[in-house]
Image (spheres, grey):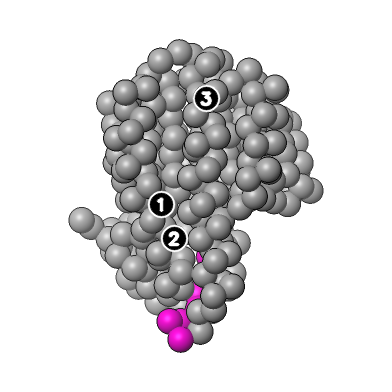
């Protein structure tokens, strides 16, 4: 399905990012694993390659412009171009309105929103070089929280993901003439390490809010991403796919 194409996945060492990277690699893409944790990124890449996939890795902090530049240049050097960009790297906190600090707010915005935008910007000159026009795909991992405020997450997190949805729609309009589609996937609470800050009581409360009766799994999100990256989604842009078991419908 993705033979001859290259994908960058940020925050790809674990959870949704890793499962997405592994799914794309299983279907033929060369994948650049990007994560702030160099050791975990190396392990993720090794696991994909051991399973027959093709990947490389780079340690990068997406909130830093220089790291993003290095990520893009290394990917182009290794794979010859960029066809798919998955902006998955993110920080989740559960602070209340009263507890949220300026430092927390700024850090979340820097990673979740600024990092995603500038990764898009820096990837643009290289997108579609392997496969030509109408093959550039950008997929931003938003959140249920960006759609309706969320249940147990912090205001800063909700704001960052709502902003990412807005950026997705704006970029989709602006980049359509270039043949590049830009979409978002908005997961509900997903069973990954990122919810480790939540108490058991909070997790049970989140499950109770899901009509399908469970939390999401990384593969639920990875399959939606793979569809948006595929040829079958070439006429879809500016869309938000909700992967939340019915917790938000709208």
Q: Main secondary structure of the magenta part?
A: loop
> Does residue 152 show up?
yes
Where, quadrant-wise, is the C terminus in this rendering? bottom left
Front position in the image: 96 or 206 = 96
The numbered mark at residue 160 is 2
Q: Start and end of the magenta stretch?
A: 92-98
Q: Which residue has dot 1 on it?
A: 164
Query: Looking at this rendering, what residue extends furthest in the bottom direction?
Result: 98
Mark 2 or mark 3: name the one nearer the start of the chain.
3
> Does residue 90 show up?
no
Q: Nearer the viewer, mark 1 or mark 3?
A: 3
Distance between the Cα atoms at labels 2 and 3? 26 Å
Q: Which residue has dot 3 on it?
A: 125
Magenta-drawn stretch contains 198: no
Are there few (<14), some (14-19), or many (20+) residues within 10 Å of tag 3? Answer: few
Which residue lies at the image location 63% right of the left edge and 32% below the top edge? 72
């Amino acid at each position: 399905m993705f033979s001859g194409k290259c994908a960058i996945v940020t925050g790809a060492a674990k959870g949704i990012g890793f499962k997405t990277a592994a799914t794309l690699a299983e279907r033929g893409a060369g994948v650049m694993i990007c994560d702030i944790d160099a050791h975990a990124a190396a392990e993720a890449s090794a696991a994909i390659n051991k399973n027959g996939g093709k990947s490389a890795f780079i340690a990068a902090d997406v909130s830093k412009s220089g790291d993003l530049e290095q990520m893009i240049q290394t990917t182009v050097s290794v794979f010859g171009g960029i066809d798919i960009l998955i902006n998955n790297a993110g920080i989740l906190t559960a602070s209340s309105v009263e507890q949220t600090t300026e430092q927390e707010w700024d850090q979340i915005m820097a990673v979740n929103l600024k990092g995603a935008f500038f990764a898009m910007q820096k990837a643009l000159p290289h997108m579609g070089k392997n496969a030509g026009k109408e093959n550039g795909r950008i997929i931003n991992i938003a959140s249920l929280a960006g759609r309706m405020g969320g249940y147990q997450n912090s205001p800063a997190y909700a704001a960052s993901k709502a902003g990412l949805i807005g950026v997705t729609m704006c970029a989709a309009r602006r980049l359509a003439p270039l043949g590049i589609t830009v979409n978002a996937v908005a997961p509900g609470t997903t069973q990954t390490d990122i919810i480790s800050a939540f108490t058991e009581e909070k997790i049970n409360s989140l499950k109770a809010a899901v009509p399908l009766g469970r939390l999401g799994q990384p593969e639920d999100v990875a399959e939606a991403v793979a569809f948006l990256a595929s040829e079958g989604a070439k006429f879809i842009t500016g869309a938000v796919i909700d992967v939340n078991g019915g917790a938000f419908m709208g």
